[in-house]
Image: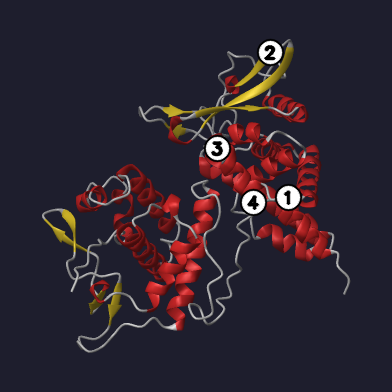
Amino acid sequence: MSKFRGHPLIDTKDYLDSQAEFEFHPSIREFLEQLQPPTEDLLRDFQLSLRFVSDYSDTPGTFNRFRGEVQRFLNYLWVTAKRSLAQVDEEVVQSYFKMLRTPPLPWVSRGIYPGFLEKEGLRVPNPKWRPFALRTQDEKARYHATQATLNSSRTVLQRYFIFLVQRDYLAKNPMPNLRRRDQRAKTGVVNVDEKTARRLNNWQWSYLLKTLQEAANEDPAYERELFVVVTMKSLFLRVGELAPRPMDDGVERVPLFSDFRIKNVQGEEYWSYTVFGKGDKTRSVTLPTGYLPFLRRWREHLGLVPSLPLPTDNHPILPSNRGGGALGKRQVQRAFESAIELTAERMDNENLTEEAARLLAIKNETHYLRHTGASMAIEAGVDIRHISEELGHASAAFTEAVYVNADETRRRLANRDRSI
């Protein structure tokens, strides 16, 4: 019988913070280094997966379910399929679900065991742990996935792949429409259209913008919400790109007004914004002319002169109310949430109850602004290669896979208008 060549990957929630650096889990890094995909790719797979599972650490039952499914899938992906997460496609997921129904015997333990044990101050893999577990010691018993198990796996992986798509690690959600013999009951999980970016529609964006403008006109306390939302949408920013972040050299990088610069090309002037993004990479985003009034408005609200920034202006773009610093990532995200809540409240007051519920459902998903801005720019005719560069994507092909599908759009709209 072949041996189990996998490894437990995610410890209990008490060790989540330390796992990222392998301080107490050196065997995980050793495991990754012996696998076929490049170690650098697997390290990123691991870090992203750890971040995903960490989002569910507040609820013990949910955390354990998500942790178990993710480390089971990664073991299959790395050990059996010999691929990294960036290489996942529908065929891999289909094969994984086949394996889930009747896993190989070496992948099943007889009894439930923790993944890690304490030894000499370190967390070491438990040799009895397996991705699947039977609650009996009977050697004749065989593991067969229940309908509930298959449903749970599908639910977790749907959220997992959506998380990876939102972070530009996957171009599309690889979850296929599983055949009836692989998934006999519907899970109740809506299968996200992997060919379309998750964005606000034109009406939602117009309503959101109008609501924030009117609120800020009446109460300056909403100027921050207005500026954050317009900036993230217009400049295709991730929430972390408007907040301080540590660089590789350990120095904290704060977004400053000096990151806005006026440039000249063939005698024509335009404004740009320098983004310090993931991996200490910088990119330059062109400011739409229509964005400049919002930039002026924000600076006037802060009492800064002149109305547009100079190259020497080292004031934080989003100063903290406490003074002397800049808003953190969570505060920037909170500004977005506040904007959504305000807009949904207005919708409710105008008897747009369903629209309000739809908007509130995405109040924690700030990436909607980035996707909305990019989608609208492409629809307006901006060259997709330029948009790709300003999004910070590795290639225009990736951008096209996420944002563009003209044939699909035409088919859907034509089908929408068919007669009953």
Q: Circle 3 — which element?
A: loop
Q: Can residue 332 be seen in this view?
A: no
Q: Quadrant of the N terminus?
A: bottom left
Sequence-earlier tag: 3 or 4 = 4
Quarter of the C terminus within the rendering: bottom right
* Crowd rating for badge 2 (residues with CA inside 10 Å; few <14, some 14–19, many 20+): few
Vertical arrangement, residue 10 with respect to residue 281, above or below: below
Task: State the residue position of label 4.
Answer: 197
Q: Gap between marks 2 and 4, in whole Å?
A: 33 Å
Q: In which quadrant of the rendered view does residue 266 lie?
A: top right
Q: What residue is pinned by disc 1?
A: 406
Give, as a three-letter code, the residue at label 4: Ala
Residue type at mark 2: give it: Asn
Tell me where residue 156 appears, x and y as whole percent: 47, 66
Rounded to the nearest whole Å, what is the CA distance between mark 4 and mark 1? 13 Å
Colour scheme in the image? secondary structure
Mark positioned earlier in the residue sequence (2 or 4): 4
